[in-house]
Amino acid sequence: MAGPPVGHPRRFFGREQQLKRLFNLLKRTPLQNAAIIGPRRSGKTSLLLHLKQVTTTPVEQLRPGQRSDWLLKPESFCWVFVDFQDCRLGSREGLLRYLLACLKLPIPYPCDLDRFLEVVSNHLRIPTVILLDEIGVALHRYAELNDAFWEGLRSLATNQVGGKLSFILATHESPLDLAQHTGHSSPFFNIFAYTTTLGPLLEPEAHALIASSPIPFPDADIEWILTQSSGWPILLQILCRERLFSLEEGDLSDDWREEGLQQLKPFAHLLA
Protein backbone atom coordinates (compact mmCIF):
# COMPACT_ATOMS: atom_id res chain seq x y z
CA MET A 1 0.00 0.00 0.00
CA ALA A 2 1.48 3.33 -1.06
CA GLY A 3 0.00 6.79 -0.74
CA PRO A 4 -2.54 7.13 2.08
CA PRO A 5 -1.51 7.06 5.75
CA VAL A 6 -1.34 3.63 7.31
CA GLY A 7 -4.77 3.14 8.83
CA HIS A 8 -4.38 -0.20 10.62
CA PRO A 9 -1.62 -1.09 13.11
CA ARG A 10 -0.90 -4.42 11.39
CA ARG A 11 0.36 -2.52 8.35
CA PHE A 12 2.56 -0.16 10.34
CA PHE A 13 6.26 -0.98 10.41
CA GLY A 14 9.18 0.46 12.32
CA ARG A 15 9.51 3.59 14.48
CA GLU A 16 10.09 1.38 17.51
CA GLN A 17 12.39 3.88 19.20
CA GLN A 18 9.96 6.75 18.69
CA LEU A 19 7.02 4.68 19.95
CA LYS A 20 8.90 3.75 23.10
CA ARG A 21 9.76 7.35 23.92
CA LEU A 22 6.32 8.74 23.09
CA PHE A 23 4.42 6.17 25.13
CA ASN A 24 6.82 6.68 28.04
CA LEU A 25 5.63 10.29 28.16
CA LEU A 26 2.10 9.02 28.81
CA LYS A 27 2.71 6.39 31.47
CA ARG A 28 2.11 8.67 34.44
CA THR A 29 0.61 12.03 35.28
CA PRO A 30 1.23 14.71 34.46
CA LEU A 31 1.09 13.54 30.87
CA GLN A 32 3.78 15.18 28.77
CA ASN A 33 3.59 16.82 25.36
CA ALA A 34 5.54 15.92 22.24
CA ALA A 35 6.22 17.11 18.72
CA ILE A 36 6.83 14.78 15.78
CA ILE A 37 8.94 16.55 13.18
CA GLY A 38 9.67 15.33 9.68
CA PRO A 39 9.63 16.28 6.01
CA ARG A 40 6.55 15.90 3.85
CA ARG A 41 5.58 12.23 3.37
CA SER A 42 7.92 10.98 6.09
CA GLY A 43 5.13 9.11 7.91
CA LYS A 44 4.03 11.60 10.56
CA THR A 45 0.31 11.00 10.11
CA SER A 46 0.78 7.22 10.10
CA LEU A 47 2.67 7.46 13.39
CA LEU A 48 -0.09 9.55 14.98
CA LEU A 49 -2.74 7.05 13.88
CA HIS A 50 -0.64 4.16 15.18
CA LEU A 51 -0.30 5.81 18.58
CA LYS A 52 -4.06 6.19 18.71
CA GLN A 53 -4.92 2.60 17.78
CA VAL A 54 -2.21 0.09 18.56
CA THR A 55 -2.69 -0.28 22.33
CA THR A 56 -6.35 -1.29 21.98
CA THR A 57 -6.13 -3.38 18.81
CA PRO A 58 -6.78 -7.07 19.55
CA VAL A 59 -3.58 -9.12 19.40
CA GLU A 60 -5.04 -11.43 16.76
CA GLN A 61 -5.34 -8.44 14.42
CA LEU A 62 -1.65 -7.61 14.72
CA ARG A 63 1.39 -9.27 13.17
CA PRO A 64 2.98 -12.08 15.19
CA GLY A 65 5.30 -10.48 17.72
CA GLN A 66 4.12 -6.94 17.02
CA ARG A 67 4.21 -4.97 20.23
CA SER A 68 1.08 -3.31 21.61
CA ASP A 69 1.60 -3.41 25.41
CA TRP A 70 2.94 0.11 25.62
CA LEU A 71 0.52 1.28 28.32
CA LEU A 72 -0.52 -0.41 31.57
CA LYS A 73 -4.23 0.42 31.20
CA PRO A 74 -4.75 1.42 27.56
CA GLU A 75 -8.53 1.14 27.80
CA SER A 76 -8.54 4.05 30.26
CA PHE A 77 -7.14 6.48 27.67
CA CYS A 78 -9.07 8.74 25.35
CA TRP A 79 -7.42 9.61 22.02
CA VAL A 80 -8.57 12.42 19.74
CA PHE A 81 -7.15 12.79 16.24
CA VAL A 82 -7.41 16.27 14.70
CA ASP A 83 -6.69 16.62 10.98
CA PHE A 84 -6.35 20.32 10.22
CA GLN A 85 -6.66 19.61 6.51
CA ASP A 86 -10.37 19.20 7.30
CA CYS A 87 -11.61 22.76 6.80
CA ARG A 88 -14.52 22.13 9.17
CA LEU A 89 -11.99 22.28 11.98
CA GLY A 90 -10.73 25.65 10.81
CA SER A 91 -13.28 27.65 12.79
CA ARG A 92 -12.95 27.95 16.54
CA GLU A 93 -16.46 26.72 17.23
CA GLY A 94 -16.16 23.85 14.76
CA LEU A 95 -12.96 22.61 16.36
CA LEU A 96 -14.23 22.99 19.93
CA ARG A 97 -17.44 21.13 19.13
CA TYR A 98 -15.45 18.34 17.49
CA LEU A 99 -13.15 18.00 20.51
CA LEU A 100 -16.04 17.85 22.97
CA ALA A 101 -17.87 15.30 20.84
CA CYS A 102 -14.79 13.08 20.72
CA LEU A 103 -14.34 13.47 24.48
CA LYS A 104 -18.04 12.65 24.99
CA LEU A 105 -18.50 15.77 27.05
CA PRO A 106 -21.46 18.20 27.06
CA ILE A 107 -21.43 20.73 24.23
CA PRO A 108 -22.48 24.17 25.52
CA TYR A 109 -24.30 26.81 23.56
CA PRO A 110 -22.73 28.93 22.38
CA CYS A 111 -19.60 26.80 22.16
CA ASP A 112 -16.99 29.49 22.70
CA LEU A 113 -13.53 29.13 24.22
CA ASP A 114 -14.55 30.15 27.75
CA ARG A 115 -17.37 27.61 27.92
CA PHE A 116 -15.21 24.92 26.32
CA LEU A 117 -12.48 25.39 28.92
CA GLU A 118 -15.07 25.31 31.70
CA VAL A 119 -16.63 22.06 30.46
CA VAL A 120 -13.31 20.27 30.03
CA SER A 121 -11.83 21.48 33.33
CA ASN A 122 -14.98 20.36 35.18
CA HIS A 123 -15.51 17.00 33.48
CA LEU A 124 -12.23 15.57 32.17
CA ARG A 125 -11.39 12.63 34.43
CA ILE A 126 -9.40 10.20 32.25
CA PRO A 127 -5.99 10.45 30.55
CA THR A 128 -6.54 12.18 27.23
CA VAL A 129 -4.20 12.65 24.29
CA ILE A 130 -5.04 15.10 21.51
CA LEU A 131 -3.14 14.39 18.30
CA LEU A 132 -2.76 17.50 16.14
CA ASP A 133 -1.94 16.62 12.53
CA GLU A 134 -0.94 19.21 9.94
CA ILE A 135 -0.83 21.95 12.55
CA GLY A 136 1.06 24.10 10.07
CA VAL A 137 -2.15 24.30 8.04
CA ALA A 138 -3.99 25.62 11.11
CA LEU A 139 -1.41 28.31 11.77
CA HIS A 140 -1.17 29.41 8.15
CA ARG A 141 -4.86 29.39 7.19
CA TYR A 142 -7.21 29.61 10.16
CA ALA A 143 -7.39 33.12 11.58
CA GLU A 144 -9.84 32.13 14.34
CA LEU A 145 -7.20 29.83 15.85
CA ASN A 146 -5.19 32.77 17.12
CA ASP A 147 -2.79 33.18 20.03
CA ALA A 148 -5.64 33.56 22.54
CA PHE A 149 -7.03 30.22 21.42
CA TRP A 150 -3.71 28.39 21.80
CA GLU A 151 -3.06 30.07 25.14
CA GLY A 152 -6.39 28.71 26.36
CA LEU A 153 -5.39 25.18 25.41
CA ARG A 154 -2.04 25.60 27.12
CA SER A 155 -3.68 26.76 30.34
CA LEU A 156 -6.10 23.84 30.18
CA ALA A 157 -3.33 21.26 29.85
CA THR A 158 -0.94 22.73 32.40
CA ASN A 159 -3.21 24.08 35.14
CA GLN A 160 -6.80 22.84 35.00
CA VAL A 161 -7.14 19.07 34.54
CA GLY A 162 -4.60 17.59 36.95
CA GLY A 163 -2.08 16.66 34.29
CA LYS A 164 -4.51 14.37 32.47
CA LEU A 165 -4.25 16.13 29.10
CA SER A 166 -1.45 15.83 26.56
CA PHE A 167 -0.88 17.23 23.08
CA ILE A 168 1.16 15.47 20.43
CA LEU A 169 1.53 17.42 17.22
CA ALA A 170 3.04 16.69 13.82
CA THR A 171 4.88 19.34 11.85
CA HIS A 172 7.71 19.79 9.36
CA GLU A 173 9.68 22.05 11.71
CA SER A 174 9.97 22.70 15.43
CA PRO A 175 6.83 24.16 17.05
CA LEU A 176 8.65 27.33 18.04
CA ASP A 177 10.01 27.89 14.54
CA LEU A 178 6.62 27.13 13.03
CA ALA A 179 4.89 29.63 15.33
CA GLN A 180 7.47 32.28 14.56
CA HIS A 181 7.22 31.77 10.80
CA THR A 182 3.42 32.09 10.92
CA GLY A 183 3.30 35.15 13.16
CA HIS A 184 2.20 33.41 16.36
CA SER A 185 3.69 34.04 19.79
CA SER A 186 1.53 31.91 22.07
CA PRO A 187 3.37 30.10 24.90
CA PHE A 188 1.44 26.99 23.81
CA PHE A 189 4.32 26.25 21.48
CA ASN A 190 6.76 26.20 24.41
CA ILE A 191 5.22 23.16 26.12
CA PHE A 192 6.67 20.55 23.75
CA ALA A 193 9.70 19.52 25.74
CA TYR A 194 10.20 16.32 23.74
CA THR A 195 10.62 16.27 19.98
CA THR A 196 11.41 13.38 17.67
CA THR A 197 12.54 13.76 14.08
CA LEU A 198 11.49 11.10 11.59
CA GLY A 199 14.09 9.79 9.19
CA PRO A 200 14.37 6.57 7.17
CA LEU A 201 13.48 3.26 8.81
CA LEU A 202 16.25 1.25 10.40
CA GLU A 203 17.47 -1.58 8.14
CA PRO A 204 15.74 -4.37 10.13
CA GLU A 205 12.51 -2.37 10.05
CA ALA A 206 12.78 -1.87 6.29
CA HIS A 207 13.46 -5.58 5.81
CA ALA A 208 10.36 -6.41 7.86
CA LEU A 209 8.21 -4.18 5.67
CA ILE A 210 9.56 -5.80 2.48
CA ALA A 211 9.09 -9.28 3.93
CA SER A 212 5.38 -8.60 4.43
CA SER A 213 4.82 -9.06 0.68
CA PRO A 214 2.46 -11.97 -0.03
CA ILE A 215 4.96 -13.08 -2.68
CA PRO A 216 8.61 -13.16 -1.51
CA PHE A 217 11.04 -10.98 -3.42
CA PRO A 218 14.40 -12.25 -4.74
CA ASP A 219 17.38 -11.13 -2.65
CA ALA A 220 18.74 -8.98 -5.47
CA ASP A 221 15.46 -7.09 -5.69
CA ILE A 222 15.39 -6.56 -1.94
CA GLU A 223 18.84 -5.01 -1.98
CA TRP A 224 17.91 -2.79 -4.93
CA ILE A 225 14.75 -1.63 -3.18
CA LEU A 226 16.67 -0.82 0.00
CA THR A 227 19.30 1.12 -1.93
CA GLN A 228 16.88 3.14 -4.07
CA SER A 229 14.54 3.98 -1.18
CA SER A 230 17.21 4.76 1.41
CA GLY A 231 14.75 3.24 3.87
CA TRP A 232 12.02 5.89 3.64
CA PRO A 233 8.65 4.18 4.23
CA ILE A 234 6.76 5.77 1.33
CA LEU A 235 9.56 4.93 -1.12
CA LEU A 236 9.77 1.37 0.17
CA GLN A 237 6.02 1.00 -0.26
CA ILE A 238 6.09 2.31 -3.83
CA LEU A 239 8.92 0.05 -4.96
CA CYS A 240 7.43 -2.98 -3.20
CA ARG A 241 4.10 -2.28 -4.86
CA GLU A 242 5.70 -2.20 -8.30
CA ARG A 243 7.65 -5.39 -7.68
CA LEU A 244 4.64 -7.22 -6.32
CA PHE A 245 2.53 -6.16 -9.29
CA SER A 246 5.14 -7.50 -11.73
CA LEU A 247 5.37 -10.82 -9.88
CA GLU A 248 1.58 -11.19 -9.84
CA GLU A 249 1.54 -10.58 -13.60
CA GLY A 250 4.33 -13.08 -14.22
CA ASP A 251 6.51 -10.36 -15.76
CA LEU A 252 10.11 -11.60 -15.73
CA SER A 253 11.63 -8.34 -17.01
CA ASP A 254 13.11 -5.50 -14.97
CA ASP A 255 10.61 -2.97 -16.31
CA TRP A 256 9.16 -2.63 -12.81
CA ARG A 257 12.38 -0.98 -11.68
CA GLU A 258 12.12 1.76 -14.28
CA GLU A 259 8.47 2.31 -13.42
CA GLY A 260 9.32 2.37 -9.72
CA LEU A 261 11.95 5.05 -10.19
CA GLN A 262 9.45 7.13 -12.14
CA GLN A 263 6.97 6.85 -9.27
CA LEU A 264 9.61 8.04 -6.79
CA LYS A 265 10.19 11.36 -8.54
CA PRO A 266 7.47 13.31 -6.64
CA PHE A 267 9.26 12.35 -3.42
CA ALA A 268 12.78 13.29 -4.47
CA HIS A 269 13.01 15.72 -1.53
CA LEU A 270 13.37 12.73 0.79
CA LEU A 271 16.56 11.66 -0.99
CA ALA A 272 18.13 15.10 -1.27
Image: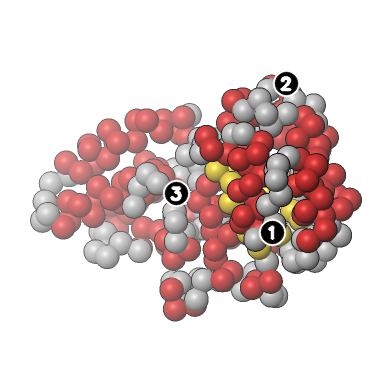
**First in sequence: mark 1 vs mark 2:** 1
Whether residue 57 is situated above or below residue 255 in the rendered picture: below
x 24%, y 42%: residue: 257
x, y percent for residue 231? 45, 47
Under circle 2, the secondary element is: loop
Whether residue 257 is situated above or below residue 1 in the rendered picture: above
Whether residue 93 is situated above or below residue 168 in the rendered picture: above
Contact check, label 2 and label 3, Cβ < 8 Å: no
Give the amino acid at mark 3: Pro
Would you say residue 155 is visible in this rendering? yes
Q: Residues within 10 Å of mark 3 (few under 14, many from 20)?
A: some
**First in sequence: mark 1 vs mark 3:** 3
x, y percent for residue 45? 53, 47
Q: Residues within 10 Å of mark 2 (few under 14, many from 20)?
A: few
Say left or right for 134 vs 268: right
x 76%, y 40%: residue: 113
Which residue is identified by label 1? 105
Give the amino acid at mark 2: Gly
Say which quarter of the image contains residue 17: bottom right
Marks 2/3: CA distance? 29 Å
**First in sequence: mark 2 vs mark 3:** 3
Which residue is identified by label 2? 183
x, y percent for residue 256? 20, 44
Viewer-nearest of discs 2 and 3 = 2
Which residue is identified by label 3? 5
